[in-house]
Image (cartoon, helix red, strand yellow):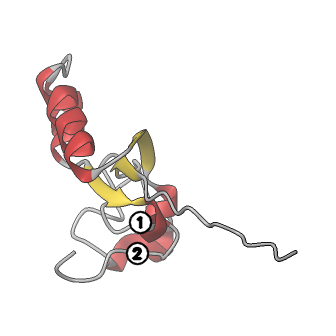
Amino acid sequence: MTHTRSSLVLLAWVLLTPPYGATPQDAWLCTSCGDPGHLNEGAPLTRWRRLGTYADADACRSARDVHIDQARNDEEWSDMQLSRCFPEERVGKGRLRPGE
């Protein structure tokens, strides 16, 4: 009898927003990355705040739009404007590359 394994790969999408603040090493990554009061867009994706996981890119983008529409104040709206959708597998691969 032969056993076959079926591997089902589910590619989830995650909605992330950059973390606040930075480490001293992050200061060179972007204009405001060294300022503890600003979002650190240069941080590795593993440090970004996870807002949700979705089945596909369209669902992730729709959720992002809802977060933006439901922002309670200007600061939260600004945070959500910087949020991005990424495939789950991309999150573990470090910092964003130019053009990503």
Residue at image location 31% in from the left, 51% down from the top: 39
Q: Which residue lies furthest to the right in this view?
A: 1
Residue at image location 50% in from the left, 65% down from the top: 23
Do the residues under discs 2 and 1 have CB atoms within 8 angstroms? yes
Q: Which residue lies furthest to the front in this view?
A: 1
Which of the pair 32/83 is nearer the observer? 83
Could you say whether the residue bearing mark 2 is in a helix, strand or loop?
Answer: loop
Q: In which quarter of the image is residue 6?
A: bottom right
Percent coordinates x, y for residue 22 in the rendering: 44, 60
Residue at image location 71% in from the left, 69% down from the top: 5
> Of marks 2 and 1, which one's residue comes earlier in the chain?
1
Residue topped by disc 1? 43
Q: Quadrant of residue 11?
A: bottom left
Residue 1, relative to residue 85: is it above or below? Answer: below
Percent coordinates x, y for residue 81 in the rendering: 15, 43
For the residue marked with disc 2, what is the amino acid? Arg
Numbered mark located on residue 95 in the image: 2
